[in-house]
Amino acid sequence: MPHVTIELTENTRLNRSQEELLDEVNAALLASGQFQEADIKSRCITLPVYRQGTEARERAFVHARLCILDGRELATRRALGQAVCDVIAEAVRPLAGGEVQVSVEVAEMERASYAKQVITSAS
């Protein structure tokens, strides 16, 4: 824990690779002191089909969902969401004549029902 899923519209342009963006998001989450390094999992999903609003304008969006186990205070959740948002916004290039919206949702997963197993090789 945590899990980060970043969805980008196909017309979103980054000033770094998606792999580098994930590295930066993971580093920001590690720097928060809330998570162990190996527990941070992230991925990017490019959306080839999407809609934003109703007008025929040049628009793009990036939305991240940060899933964490429940029990952290609102201020901590807010800081985590803002840290992820800041990293993503820094990586996004503006659209010529358009806009890009960056948003982050922090979702709590119920600790009591969360299951996890770590599979390691025999040494």
Image (cartoon, helix red, strand yellow):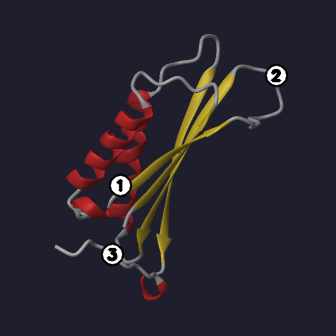
Q: Residues within 10 Å of mark 3 (few under 14, many from 20)?
A: few
* Looking at the image, residue 89 lies above or below residue 104: above
| Between discs 3 and 1, the one toward the N terminus | 1
How far separated are the C-alphas under marks 1 and 2?
34 Å
How far separated are the C-alphas under marks 2 and 3?
47 Å
Q: Amino acid at mark 2?
A: Ala
At numbered mark 2, what does the secondary structure look like: helix, strand or loop? loop
How far separated are the C-alphas under marks 3 and 1?
25 Å
For image coordinates 77% across by 36% down, the residue present is: 51
| Residue contact at pointers 2 and 3, CB within 8 angstroms | no
Name the spot of residue 61 as percent of width and height, x first: 61, 34
| Residue contact at pointers 1 and 2, CB within 8 angstroms | no
Name the spot of residue 46 as percent of width and height, x first: 60, 38
Q: Report which residue position mark 2 lands on.
A: 56
| Between discs 1 and 2, the one toward the N terminus | 2
At numbered mark 1, what does the secondary structure look like: helix, strand or loop? helix
For image coordinates 35% across by 72% down, the residue present is: 72
Q: Amino acid at mark 1?
A: Leu
16 or 77, which lies in front?
A: 16
Q: Residues within 10 Å of mark 2 (few under 14, many from 20)?
A: few
| Apparent side of residue 115 relative to residue 25 in the rendered image (left or right) | right
Count of marks overlaid on the render: 3
Q: Amino acid at mark 3?
A: Val
Name the spot of residue 47 as percent of width and height, x first: 66, 39
* Mark closer to the observer (2, 3): 3
Q: Report which residue position mark 3 lands on.
A: 118
Q: Report which residue position mark 1 lands on.
A: 80
| Between discs 2 and 3, the one toward the N terminus | 2
52 or 118, which lies in front?
A: 118
Q: Residues within 10 Å of mark 1 (few under 14, many from 20)?
A: many
* Looking at the image, residue 105 lies above or below residue 11: below
